[in-house]
Image (cartoon, rainbow, N blue to C red):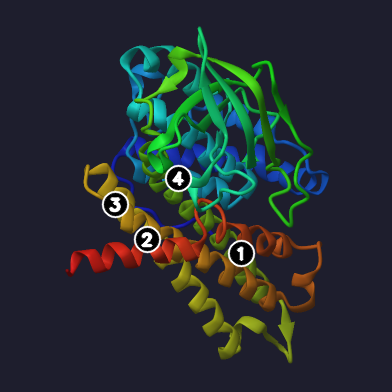
Amino acid sequence: MPATRLMPTDDAADLIELTREICRKDLAPRVDDAERAHAFPEQAFRTLGRAGLLSLPYPEEHGGADQPYEVYLQVVEEIASVWMSVAVGVSVHSLTAYPVATFGTDEQKAALLPGMLSGDQLGAYCLSEPLAGSDIASMTTRATRTADGWSLKGTKAWISHAGHADYYTTFARTSDDGGKGLSTFIVPGDAPGLTFAEPERKMGLHCDPVAQVMFDAVPVDAARLVGAEGDGMKTALSALDAGRLGIAAAATGLAQAALDAAARYASEREQFGRRIADFQGLAFLLADMEAAVTSARATYLHAARLKDAGRAFSKEAAVAKLVATDAAMKVTTDAVQVLGGAGYTEDFPLERYMREAKVTQIFEGTNQIQRLVVSRQLLAQVR
């Protein structure tokens, strides 16, 4: 059941219809087999790229579509309602272009963004490390000056698209000044000294390969330092605000898919001579699921509209990520319950949805971190 949407323009409405068509014809027929095979969905990304759906919120002059964030996020949600791994990949890719688009020089934008936004390239976002997850300032990957630019050494962890990306947006330490000693680099995917560990054996999102990325004296041209040296923390935190909205939208799409599957099943399954949907206890459960999905969508759209208006949205992004991902976990769990024993089997996608939902409460900042962000900003406003 398609989500009810109020799009800001006719072009935006057309983008949603295009996304739904691609999801129906190109993604839906392949998702189940691909997830079972843990196959990287390269063709799916190429299809979305050719349709211009990997570059929606970026400037048209560099290959983007100049769409507001509220439109881009609803496209992500539509993709997630069919293939969560691909939707997460779209969000990650958009995040990788953010530092160049926001903090890059005109020369860097002209040199790098066309490739990033063309649909021919896929990016990876290298921030987390084995011992530096939520505590970004403790990262140890180091960039050392050379005659031609920089040399990067260290290990990044939990990196989507590792081994498949064409470039790696990487944060590394350029001084020992804590959070003020981090800088941002765009590392080519074929750079010498760049290697990858075996993918993590994850509970879900099997088509989103996640692995450690190792930098062993990886050379990076001076022109690929994005922003000022030492501004990496500011860049990373700014990008994460936008990235959290991408995950909120994806989580909402996943929850919508679970709700739709549960409602269809409840309308078809009969017990005691009646549809199980006609029993008030189950009907109320479905109503609560609908309320959770609708609330999640409202929170991420509110934050996106603040961002589009040029207003502060960090707190609202954290709220959206928190609300939407908690909703995804609850709705997918309840959807399994609606199907009963059938929901616990691989004959239906609900068990996969439930496994995929869990990680949304963890990546792009755990939901405990989101609560910390929200509470600090809330209390700062009342001092």
Residue 377 x/y as whole percent: 28, 62
Mark toward the viewer: 2 or 3 = 2
Q: Label 4, secondary structure: give it.
A: helix
Amino acid under disc 2: Val
Q: Is residue 129 above or below residue 322?
A: above
Could you tell me which quadrant the N terminus lies in? bottom right
- Sequence-wise, the earlier of marks 2 and 3 is 3
Mark toward the viewer: 1 or 3 = 3
Residue, disc 2: 373
- Sequence-wise, the earlier of marks 4 and 1 is 4
The reply to whether callout 2 and callout 1 are in contact (CB within 8 Å) is: no
The disc label shown at residue 243, or none? 4
Amino acid under disc 3: Phe
Residue, disc 1: 258
**What's the distance in space between the residues labelled 4 and 1, CA to CA?**
23 Å
Which residue is depicted at the point 63% across and 40% down? 159
- Judge by depth and name the residue closer to the eye, 190 or 307: 190
Does the rendering let one see residue 131? yes
The quarter holding residue 228 reads top left
- Judge by depth and name the residue closer to the eye, 264 or 215: 215
Residue 235 x/y as whole percent: 38, 36
Residue, disc 3: 313
